[in-house]
Amino acid sequence: MGMIVLGLRNLLRNKMRLVLVVTLIGVPFFLLLAMQSIGEAVQQQTSVLTRDVNTVLQLRARGSMGHVNMNGQDRLLPPATLEKVRGIEHVVQVEPYLLAMAPITPPNFVMHVGLAPTAVKRLESHGEAGNPRIIAGRDLAPEDTGQDVGIIGRGYAEWAGIKPEDMGKATLTIDPTRTHPVIYGMDRPKRDLRIIGMYASGYIFGDLQLFMPIDTFRSIYGTEQGISWLFVRVDSVENVPVVAQRLQETVGSVADILAPKSAAVFTATTSRTVTQLAWLGGLIAILLMIVVVFFVLLMQVRERAREIGTLKAIGASNGGVTTQFLTEAVALTLIGGFVGLVLFRLAGDALTGRLFALGIGPFLPSHYKPLFESLTVSSQLSISVLMFVLLVAVVAAILGSAYGVWQLVKLSPLEAMKHE
């Protein structure tokens, strides 16, 4: 016990050495925590993509875009399609959409979308890039069902003169009678929608949409039956081919079945590559920490060979000397780890997030970047990760210190003193 106490007291004997060693241990500790955090963030985002992108199939009326007022493209899926699809094994969710086009100048037209208030708000031509970021006001909620409300894209809002501060007060007039070379007018009355939210998608055409409750859409455009698009979510990526085959057999005669192949390729290649790079970085960080801790503690022991010789000269046993230095090594490692953890908690969100953004940016096609805007690299770590990092550091410290002590305690006191 006395040698343990002596080892702890020795920590404060040389404050400059204490600061230097703790810093050298804390920095790789911080880097390892950062890499672990990046790896977890990529894993979480990959899980989101796997769940929300790869597992979704889209159905449209065969040979039609499914827009209720588009010349030659207004055929809709029969209402019975919804129940048929819901009955297929491995299908966990079915989301019906209705779409209409509205002319504006420029850039020619915008898209009006009717959907369940809680459904994923997918973007025309980029259906996999769902739930764009709300930048003002609020999103649709279940209580908005059947109400004359909507959320508008930033580009559409700019054209209509609607500002973020107008949310909840601004209105937008829907006029089904307006035409365009690709749009035919419908003999329906105008309707004013109260704009309750504004979103941003990250690309121009994605910001030219208006989302409203599907019952409101049916009332405005007189579309009592039929479905423009049907998004089918499957319970796992592995079952997507099976469900696609069953869809073909069940409703294939009236529907085109679209799989998000580009998104699947993205998740299978880019996301997997980034995940592998993150874990490779974590492995390098672990090796760096082991090397740094091992050699820092080894050098710290070797530079104190005279002290070890003196201890042996006054009667300290080899075991006692070893206990003292191992105690000091473990204490230094724990202090260095604590410093690295504090640094990570204080600056981890900003620094790690920035490193992650710089690292992943080159891998992303421009139209996929909105998917990662909501990704956060948190400074929160699980206890298991923290304990693993501490264990690795302590083991490296013990090995480095023990190796240095072992080389010196086998020498006589005089040899140890000369060794320094």
Image (cartoon, rainbow, N blue to C red):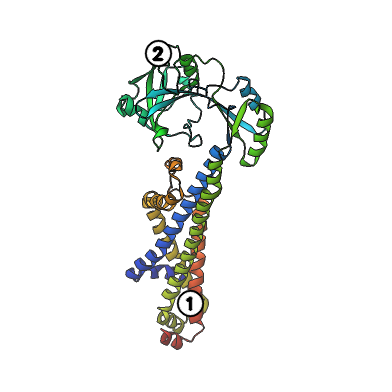
* Residue 363 screen position, x and y as percent: 46, 50
Nearer to me, 408 or 316: 408
Residue 396, relative to residue 197: is it above or below?
Answer: below
Residue 212, relative to residue 238: is it above or below?
Answer: above
Q: Residue sitting at 51 percent across and 36 percent down?
A: 128
Q: Which residue is mark 1?
A: 404
* Residue 46 screen position, x and y as percent: 52, 45
Q: Residue sitting at 52 percent across and 52 percent down?
A: 275
**Which quarter of the rendered picture does the C terminus lie within?**
bottom left
* Residue 401 screen position, x and y as percent: 48, 72
Residue 121 visible at all: yes
Q: Is residue 404 left or right of residue 77?
A: left
Residue 317, relative to residue 223: is it above or below?
Answer: below
Given the image, on which type of amino acid does mark 2 rest? Lys
Measure how far apart labels 2 and 1 are at the Cα level: 85 Å
Residue 242, relative to residue 325: is it above or below?
Answer: above
Judge the density around disc 1: few (<14), some (14-19), many (≥20) Cα neighbours within 10 Å.
Answer: many
- For marks 2 and 1, the one nearer the N-term is 2
Residue 382 visible at all: no
Q: Residue sitting at 41 percent across and 55 percent down?
A: 341
Given the image, on which type of amino acid does mark 1 rest? Gly
* Residue 247 screen position, x and y as percent: 65, 31
Corner quadrant of residue 373: top left
Q: Which residue is mark 2?
A: 190
Nearer to me, 173 or 317: 173
Judge the density around disc 2: few (<14), some (14-19), many (≥20) Cα neighbours within 10 Å.
Answer: few
Corner quadrant of residue 175: top left
- Of helix, strand and loop, which one carries label 1? helix
